[in-house]
Image (cartoon, rainbow, N blue to C red):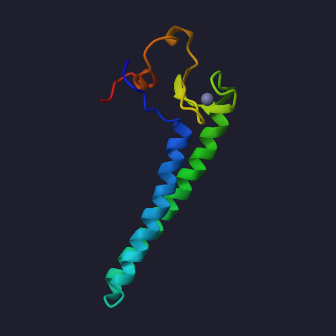
Amino acid sequence: MAEITYKNKINRIRTFALSLIFIGFGIMYVGIFFRKVEWLMLIFIILGTLAIVFSTVVYFWIGLLSTRAVQIICPTCNKPTKMLGRVDACMHCKQPLTMDKELEGKEFDEGYNSKKKSR
Ligand SMILES: [Zn+2]
């Protein structure tokens, strides 16, 4: 069986939001190098601010998703985890979990969440 490197969806979005903050600050930092060219520096600062604003939007979205996520106790590590959709991975031990009895025991596939299969 192929090795599953699947991450919990909420955790994945959280990582994305966090990296956006770093990207935002990174862009602003680059802007400092162009402080002699005022308009260029301004563009970098605006872009950086946008990235940070966008990340707070994503964080807000995670908050909304979390309220809709189903909280369950992971059967593998016995810790509470939140899952989104029909299949998701445990936040702690990355154990694939499913809400659907039909999918139990089947090979883990993210494609079960949507009709079209990506990758
Ligand atoms: Zn677990």
In the rendered image, residue 96, in percent from the top left (x then y), is placed at 52, 24
Q: Nearer the viewer, residue 57 or 4?
A: 4
Task: Tell me the quadrant of the picture where the C terminus can be found.
Answer: top left
Task: State the image quarter where residue 66 is shown.
Answer: top right
With 69 as the anchor, is 42 left or right in this view? left
Rendered residue at 58%/45% (across/down): 62
Residue with the most extreme bottom position: 36
Q: Is residue 67 above or below residue 42?
A: above
With 67 as the anchor, is 84 left or right in this view? left
Q: Is residue 35 above or below residue 95?
A: below
Q: Is residue 15 above or below residue 102?
A: below
Q: Nearer the viewer, residue 61 or 24?
A: 24
In the rendered image, residue 112, in percent from the top left (x then y), is placed at 44, 20
Task: State the image quarter where residue 107 is shown.
Answer: top left
Rendered residue at 51%/63% (across/down): 53
Task: State the image quarter where residue 99 is shown.
Answer: top right
With 14 as the anchor, is 112 left or right in this view? left
With 22 as the anchor, is 117 left or right in this view? left
Residue with the most extreme top position: 102
* Number of numbered markers: 0
**Quadrant position of ligand 1:** top right
Q: Nearer the viewer, residue 116 or 14?
A: 14
In the rendered image, residue 43, in percent from the top left (x then y), is placed at 36, 76
Rendered residue at 46%/24% (across/down): 113
Task: Tell me the quadrant of the picture where the N terminus can be found.
Answer: top left
Rendered residue at 33%/91% (across/down): 36
